[in-house]
Image (spheres, grey):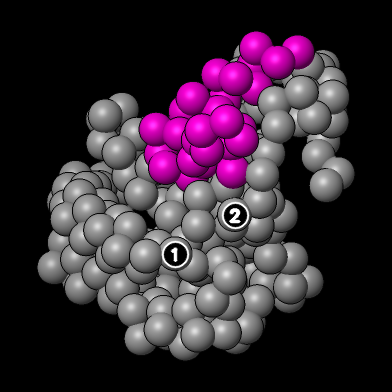
């Protein structure tokens, strides 16, 4: 595992350590069931054990890491039950939030004009990553698209809850992308969702985003059968 040294990063060390380790979990660089050690990660990232311990605490709360008594920590296995629960929460909360953004979007407001540019840039970069088949950056931009729109709500609690749910679904999505290479499909869906928001069409936004979040349901069992060692329960 070759993780980026973060000792000179501008973010706080604990936040940066959390993000680097979480990204490695979501992109399956750390495989489900793999043991992880604070000291080893601290050495790789160029930080003391304290930021790593704080990052582990947050990842434990998200159920992306599990504690094994007398054996340390391991990456949580993928769980169909947890994935189904996460999908339900995202459909319930994220769709409601996107509908509100669609209702409030004002193309004459400088705040929304800035937001518009940010999202267009994200989508353009995501297209480039799709062309390059860059799984890691593509998925990071996927998260950035959703996060940028959600952030406009100004509801930190909402973002925190949905962010926790996204981790479980994105591991499955990453696995599915490796199999099907459905990059362009996802970018097109993002563009359609954004167009519905720009049109202040809350109903269409709801319809498109619900389908976008739930489209992996049909392939979940196939992935479980192909990668049984990644799943538990």
**Is 71 rendered above or below residue 81?**
above
Q: Closer to the camera, 201 or 91?
A: 91
Q: Is residue 82 visible?
A: yes
| Secondary-structure class at tag 1 | loop
Give the labeled residue for mark 1. 232
Q: Is residue 60 magenta?
A: yes
Badge 2 crowding class, 10 Å Cα cut-off, few under 14, some 14 to 19, many 20 or more, is: some
Q: Position of residue 23 (x, y in %)?
A: 62, 45
Distance from Cα at disc 1 to Cα at disc 2: 9 Å
The mark found on residue 33 in the picture is 2
CB within 8 Å, label 1 to label 2: yes
The quadrant holding residue 72 is top right
Question: Residue drawn 84% across and 24% down?
Answer: 43
**Is 72 rendered above or below residue 83?**
above
Q: Position of residue 161 (x, y in %)?
A: 30, 38
Q: Say left or right for 219 vs 9.
A: left
Q: Does the magenta stretch include residue 88?
A: no
Q: Is residue 185 visible?
A: no
Magenta stretch, residue numbers = 48-74
Q: Earlier in the sequence, mark 1 or mark 2?
A: 2
Q: Position of residue 143 (x, y in %)?
A: 50, 51
Q: Say left or right for 204 vs 45.
A: left
The quadrant holding residue 219 is bottom left
């Amino acid at each position: 595992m070759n993780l980026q040294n973060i000792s000179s990063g501008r973010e706080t060390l604990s936040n940066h350590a959390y993000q680097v380790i979480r990204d490695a979990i979501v992109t399956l660089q750390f495989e489900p069931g793999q043991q992880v050690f604070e000291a080893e990660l601290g050495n790789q990232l160029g930080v003391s054990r304290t930021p790593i311990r704080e990052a582990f605490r947050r990842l434990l709360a998200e159920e992306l890491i599990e504690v094994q008594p007398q054996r340390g920590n391991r990456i949580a296995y993928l769980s169909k039950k947890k994935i189904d629960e996460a999908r339900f929460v995202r459909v319930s909360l994220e769709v409601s939030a996107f509908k509100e953004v669609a209702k409030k979007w004002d193309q004459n407001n400088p705040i929304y004009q800035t937001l518009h540019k940010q999202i267009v840039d994200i989508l353009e970069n995501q297209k480039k990553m799709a062309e390059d088949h860059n799984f890691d950056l593509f998925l990071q931009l996927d998260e950035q698209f959703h996060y940028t729109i959600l952030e406009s709500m100004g509801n930190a609690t909402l973002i925190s809850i949905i962010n926790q749910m996204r981790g479980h679904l994105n591991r499955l999505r990453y696995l599915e992308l490796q199999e099907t290479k459905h990059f362009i499909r996802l970018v097109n869906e993002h563009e359609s969702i954004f167009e519905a928001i720009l049109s202040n069409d809350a109903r269409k936004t709801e319809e498109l985003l619900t389908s976008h979040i739930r489209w992996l349901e049909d392939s979940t069992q196939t992935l479980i059968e192909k990668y049984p060692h990644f799943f538990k329960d």
